[in-house]
Amino acid sequence: MNISSFPSVSQPFASAIDSVIQTRKSLKILGDLNSPAKIPDDFNTRVDAAIKVANWAPFHYPANMIHRQGTMNSVVPWRFYALSQAMCLKLAHFLTQSDAKIDANSTIVRMLSACGGLVIVTWLPDPKKNPKPSKKKRIAFRIIRNEHIAAAGAATQNLLLAAEARDIQTYWSSGGVLQSSDCFKLCGIPNTQKLMGAIFMFPEPHTEMETISGKLRNKRGTKDSWMSWVTINNPHSLA
């Protein structure tokens, strides 16, 4: 993509980005499996657009070749698996009928009933080739693993912000039962991948649905409680 195609970094542009970041919030919406949410006609189009732009996240190392087979062969160390509302409802019914016997009133089933879509984000770990690697290789393995996790997290945050900009409410779930091997198999996710998060996509909540906001949103503190400017007085004193 030609860099000239991007808008210049002006104050209105920065303000728009700041607004999306600060407005985005976790919102858990709980519906009823017997009365699923009504989804706008353009909802899937907006979700798809958010997914497309989320891919512009930074990453340091390419995904291992074991993850780059078939059609999903990108070098990025994450993968997105999107479920439409119809597939979310199928998944909800599967969970209530599976051996796990998830109750229809459970949070996960009620969220699947209320959402217009679900995006399961995974990260792609490198395989361990040597059962007794050297210390140097162990360190390198951990560095690459951490880079992959961070990159997938950045792609997930991109997805949340892109969704917010398109009037889509989101909830980032750590997965729960959605990280089970049964759910992975049902959604066509290889067991060599690891769950980063399950992102529930909601339209504007209906008044009859229960909504729960994130508990920690307003507890992050002032900037001084989590940031400081660094001053290096005499680097030679470290020698």
Image: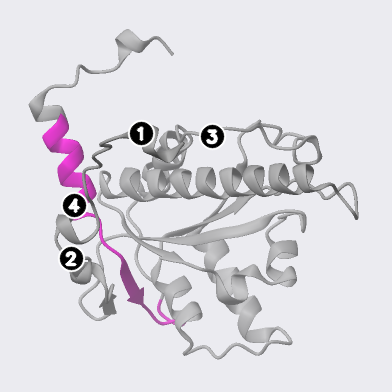
Disc 2 designates what residue? 221
Report the front residue among 177 and 29. 177
Say what amino acid the circle numbered 3 marks: Phe
- Secondary structure beneath dot 4 equals helix
Q: Are marks 3 and 4 in contact (CB under 8 Å)?
A: no
- Secondary structure beneath dot 1 equals helix
Q: CA distance from mark 3 to mark 4?
A: 24 Å
> Would residue 133 be visible to someone looking at this image?
yes
Binning the other alpha carbons within 10 Å of mark 3 as few (below 14), some (14 to 19) or many (20 upward) gives: some
Residue found at x 74% / y 69%: 181
Disc 1 designates what residue? 235
Disc 4 designates what residue? 22
- Secondary structure beneath dot 2 equals loop
Please give left or right for residue 176 compared with residue 160 in the image.
right
Q: Is residue 215 above or below residue 21?
A: below
Q: Quadrant of residue 62?
A: top right
- Which of disc 4 and disc 3 is earlier in sequence? 4
Horizontal and vertical percent position of residue 122: 61, 53
Residue 59's label in the rendered image is 3
Residue found at x 31% / y 46%: 161
Horizontal and vertical percent position of residue 147: 57, 43
Binning the other alpha carbons within 10 Å of mark 2 as few (below 14), some (14 to 19) or many (20 upward) gives: few
Look at the image and give the residue range highlighted in magenta.
Answer: 14-35
Q: Are marks 1 and 4 in contact (CB under 8 Å)?
A: no
Dot in front, 1 or 3 = 1
**In magenta stretch: residue 152:** no
